[in-house]
């Protein structure tokens, strides 16, 4: 409902109607709508940070790590589209203290990409005059898929990952990404990120 109507318009009464309970019963699960939004955005970033750390255990090659970063980013942004859209649009709706926490986590996530680009430049593999500005350009390229990707669309998720890996490597001056990084890890057809239970469910 937040993704559809916006945070301000998604009242607890409307949420309760959608869930099928009395509005007052929501307070058994959340103390406020603000808390719900904060936890939603925080969990979103925790998953992305944890997934990269887990998937890159034992991988030292910077090109392979960058390829994995792109793969995981595209997977999350195509499998958790509503959460991503909310995170992009509703950061403004957080309190200043909560916003500082979320922006801090976003900075940690983007710093991973900056470090990968900088390392690749230092090793003579990538070309980037300003790794930090390049980071923002790459993230804009990767994150836009959440607005137009359709599971039943013409391009499969696997092909979408490969296309973006190629685009990012070419942006960094690498002629053919497949020569510098492995193909995306094969995954089962079932989405890795299963839609989470409603907040407070057991």
Image (spheres, helix red, strand yellow):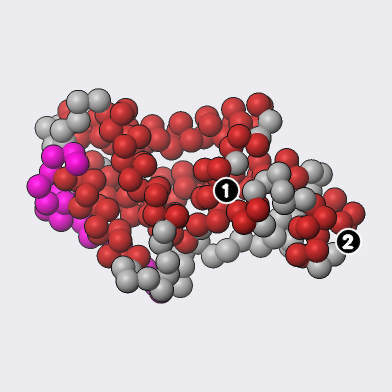
Question: Quick one: SS at disc 1?
Answer: helix
Q: Which residues are magenta?
A: 171-189
Front one among 191 and 151: 151
Front one among 116 and 139: 139
Residue 188 lies in the magenta-colored region: yes
Q: CA distance from mark 1 to mark 2?
A: 25 Å
Residue occupying image coordinates x 67% and y 57%? 1
Q: Is residue 176 depicted above or below 115 in this figure? A: below
Front one among 74 and 120: 74
Q: Is residue 146 left or right of residue 46?
A: left
Residue occupying image coordinates x 35% and y 65%? 157
Circle 2 residue: 22
Whether residue 126 appears in this view of the structure is: yes
Most prominent secondary structure in the magenta stretch? loop
Residue 66 lies in the magenta-colored region: no
Q: Residues within 10 Å of mark 2 (few under 14, many from 20)?
A: few
Q: Which mark is residue 12?
A: none
Circle 1 residue: 86
Whichever of callouts 1 and 2 sits on the residue coming sooner in the sequence is 2
Q: Position of residue 37 (x, y in %)?
A: 67, 44
Q: Position of residue 2 (x, y in %)?
A: 65, 52
State which quadrant residue 110 falls in.
top left
Q: Position of residue 106 (x, y in %)?
A: 48, 35
Numbered circles on residues, count: 2
Residue occupying image coordinates x 78% and y 58%? 14
State which quadrant residue 197 falls in.
bottom right
Question: Quick one: SS at disc 2?
Answer: loop
Whether residue 61 appears in this view of the structure is: no
Residue occupying image coordinates x 41% and y 73%? 152
Point out the image quarter for the C terminus.
bottom right
């Amino acid at each position: 409902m937040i993704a559809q109507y916006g945070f301000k318009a998604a009242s607890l009464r409307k949420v309760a109607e959608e869930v099928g309970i009395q509005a007052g019963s929501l307070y058994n699960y959340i103390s406020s709508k603000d808390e719900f939004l904060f936890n939603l955005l925080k969990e979103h970033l925790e998953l992305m940070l944890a997934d990269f750390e887990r998937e890159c255990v034992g991988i030292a090659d910077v090109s392979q790590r960058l390829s994995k970063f792109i793969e995981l980013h595209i997977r999350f942004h195509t499998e958790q589209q509503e959460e991503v859209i909310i995170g992009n649009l509703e950061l403004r709706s957080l309190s200043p203290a909560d916003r500082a926490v979320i922006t801090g986590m976003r900075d940690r996530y983007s710093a991973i990409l900056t470090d990968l680009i900088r390392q690749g430049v230092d090793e003579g593999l990538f070309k980037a005059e300003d790794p930090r500005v390049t980071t923002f350009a790459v993230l804009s390229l990767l994150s836009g898929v959440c607005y137009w990707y359709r599971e039943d669309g013409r391009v499969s998720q696997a092909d979408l990952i490969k296309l973006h890996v190629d685009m990012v490597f070419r942006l960094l001056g690498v002629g053919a990404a497949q020569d510098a990084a492995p193909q995306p890890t094969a995954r089962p057809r079932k989405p890795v990120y299963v839609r989470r239970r409603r907040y407070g469910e057991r």
